[in-house]
Amino acid sequence: MAPSVYKPIDCGFHDVLEATITQRTYTHLQYFTDLWEFTTVTGLLKNLVSERNAEGLAEYLVIDTGERIRLDRVVNVNGTFAPPFRHYHDFTCDC
């Protein structure tokens, strides 16, 4: 599967990510993987990094497991939805 072109995220949502990283608290995070699997994790957000690749510049969120998640694939952070995903519903269960 060919990688998709990175789409810069909303500045307001970028601020939410930065504030969450600064708080250093466990965070409920939902995102799409590189294979477009919808994933939910709870963990610490560590850092935001930029990387230039063949398609151009892309930004990533680094979480405590070391995984890097493209920012345009982050759906929800602690109940705050990224603007492109506002129509999504959280059907997860804390059972």
Image: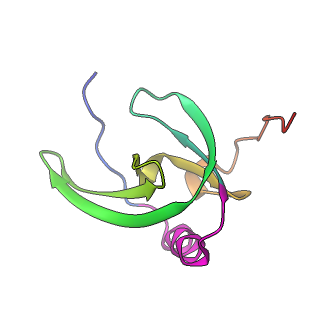
**On screen, residue 57 above or below 55:** below
- Which image quarter holds the C terminus? top right
Residue 50 falls left or right of residue 16: left
The image position of residue 49, as x and y in percent, is 32, 64
Picture residue at 71% right of the left edge, 59% below the top = 78
Q: Main secondary structure of the magenta part?
A: helix
Residue placed most toward the observer, 45 or 32: 45
Residue 21 magenta-highlighted? yes
Q: Which scheme is used to colour this image of the protein?
A: rainbow
Picture residue at 32% right of the left edge, 49% below the top = 6
**On screen, residue 7 above or below 1:** below
Residue 36 falls left or right of residue 7: right
Residue 74 magenta-highlighted? no
Residue placed most toward the observer, 69 or 87: 69
- Which image quarter holds the N terminus? top left
The image position of residue 44, as x and y in percent, is 56, 59
Picture residue at 47% right of the left edge, 46% below the top = 73
Q: Which residues are magenta?
A: 9-27
Residue 31 falls left or right of residue 58: right
Q: How many marks?
A: 0
Name the quadrant containing residue 38: top right
**On screen, residue 28 above or below 93:** below
The image position of residue 64, as x and y in percent, is 48, 55
Outermost left residue:
54
**On screen, residue 15 above or below 66:** below
Outermost top residue:
1
Picture residue at 57% right of the left edge, 77% below the top = 19
Outermost front residue:
65
